[in-house]
Structure formats: structure tokens, C-alpha cells
Image: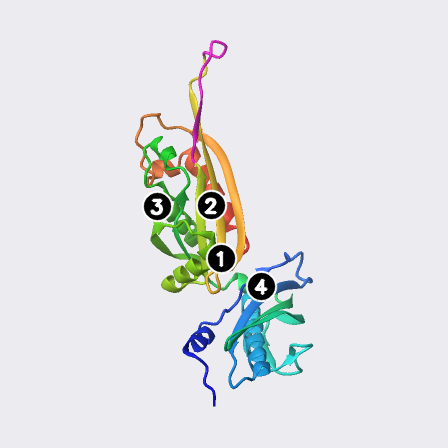
Amino acid sequence: MRQPSRTALMACLSRIMAAICLLGLVAGQAHAVWYEATGQAVVVNGNKEAAKRAASQDALKQAMLFAGASVQSVAKLTNGLLKNEEMTIRSTGEVEQLELVSEIYNGDVVTVRVRADIFPRAKICSAQQDEKHFATTHFRIRNRAQLTQGNIPNFDKAFTQRLAKAMHEQTNNLSLTYVAPHTAKFDSRYTDQNVRTLSDQSNTQFVIIGVIDDLSVTQKETSVFTPWRSNTSHRAFAMSVQVYDGINGGLLFSSSYDTTEEWAFDRFEDVDEFSSTFWLSRYGQAIDGAINQLINRRY
């Protein structure tokens, strides 16, 4: 009997659970939603059909779990994937249609990607209630020279702490449970590998990679025509955020946020970026607004 290699076994044990790319937004509770998910299995004794079936079952299970269903068993495949048989699902959804997107064989391992059309039946999708754990690094500052205004060299740490606090206080199901004590600038060729490593180290489902793109300060000075106006400084805040599936390193979504608000601190004043004075200022509140926009995204 031919035994699968150690690499293949490890690949199976650490199977890719779900890319879970939401391909459509729920326009109402009567509309189905398409999910994509990926599963893996080991080919034993050359039986590719059995391996394909196991990988497809795993992918479907992960898609259903993310959609809010509790899948106790997925037995057989029909329509090219599922065949007439037991799929025990506790509320929230049923599979209207299932499609095979791709199957790739790499040595003793088969990777299968499926698309599942899941019809929500519950009033509230429990996927929104299931707690989702995130990991991140300190958000990278694209231009650290901009931190000299206000002398805020630890703004990256302060911002990440603020994001974690907001997720904890404002949601019931989003939790930033791990912040690596460094910033990350991943080479695009190895992003998926680095994301999986961070996810594995932190035992989290999702990974956030963020960049603070702009913290520049502009000043409007008084003129001979407006002598009654005092000098007013405004500071930009812009960030780019990418959220990855920590299991397979796939990109789930990316967004950018930017705003400008009054910078009420003196030009030569040292500002404590961790203080309530900073976060209760108009500029701090504007950053909180950008954080809220990010949190209110549907993961």
C-alpha cells in the first residue's frame, strides 16, 4: 500500500479551510449569496476521485460554516459535486447550487475550489454573530518624517491599540487578539506565506495588514486681507488596509480611507499619541471615524 508523504499529510492536516470571498452583497433576506471556499485532501493509493470528493466536502463545510450554518456531516457529492445524501445543517442556510471551480493536483495532494449559492433562512445570519479573530502588525508609516510634527514617533503603536480597543468595544464578534510587536512590509511575492505564518503564530482566522499613507500637516497663515484669522493647521490622515484569510493567505478585501481635520496643537508641542487629549481632539476623532468605517465593513 502506498503511503502519502509527510508533506502531503501535513497539507491535509492544515487543509485550506476557506477563502470565503463574498461575491455578492445580501440585498435582502430572500436573496442567496455566493461563497467560494477551498479544501484539500491527500490522494491515497492513487484514488483521485475519493480525494476530490473529500476535498470538496471539506470546502463546502467551510463555506457553510462561514455563512452561519452548523454542518454536522456532508456525505456525498451531487451535480458533479453532491449526491443525494446527508447534509445535516442547523438553521440559517441551505445550498441552492454548488459548482466546481477548479481542481489542482500537486503530488499526493488535491486542492479543490467550489462556489456555493447559500440561501439564508434565519432573520439574522449567525455568521455575523460568530466571533472572528484577527491578527496584525503595527500599521506601517509610509513617511516617518511626517511624525516629527507633534513628535509622535509611536503613532503606529497608538493607532493599532486604538483599533483593537474599538473592535472590542463596538462589536460582539470582531476581535483583534494579536498584534505583532513590529511593522510589516511584505514582499508581494511572499505575502500569502507571511500571512499564513502570522495567522499560525497567533492562532487567528484573519490577518490585517495596514499602512498609514499620509500624516502631513498644512498650515493656513493669516494675510493682510484676513488679519483677524489666526494661523490654522490641518492634518491629513490616510490609510490603506488589506484583510487576508489567514489559512490560505488569500486576499479577502482591500480598502483605503482618508480625511483631513484641524490640528489644534502648537507647531513645536510634543503630543502624547496615547493620551485622551490627543484622541479627544478633532483630529483624533477624525481618525476614530476612519476606524469605525473599517470596523463596519462586512468581513
12 lies above or below 248 = below
Q: Dot 1: few (<14), some (14–19), or many (≥20) neighbours within 10 Å?
A: many
Mark 2 and mark 4: span between their CA atoms? 24 Å
> Where in the figure is residue 298, as x and y percent of width and height?
55, 55
Residue 220 in magenta?
yes
The residue depicted at 37 percent of the width and 37 percent of the height is 144
Residue 82 image offset from top left, x and y in percent? 65, 78
* Mark 3 or mark 2: whose residue is earlier in sequence: 3
Circle 3 residue: 157
Q: Spatial distance from mark 1 to mark 4, Cα to Cα?
A: 22 Å
Q: Which mark, residue 125?
A: 4
Which residue: 45% across, 73% down? 11
Residue under pointer 2: 291
Task: Report the residue marked by disc 1.
Answer: 244
* CB atoms of marks 2 and 4 within 8 Å: no
Q: Residue type at mark 1?
A: Tyr
Q: Nearer the viewer, mark 2 or mark 1?
A: 1
Q: Which residues are magenta?
A: 215-227
Dot 3 or dot 1: first in sequence order is 3
**Residue 62 in view:** no
**CB atoms of marks 4 and 3 within 8 Å:** no
For badge 2, the amino acid type reads Ile
Magenta portion: prevailing SS class: loop
Compare residues 256 and 9 and report the one nearer the observer: 9
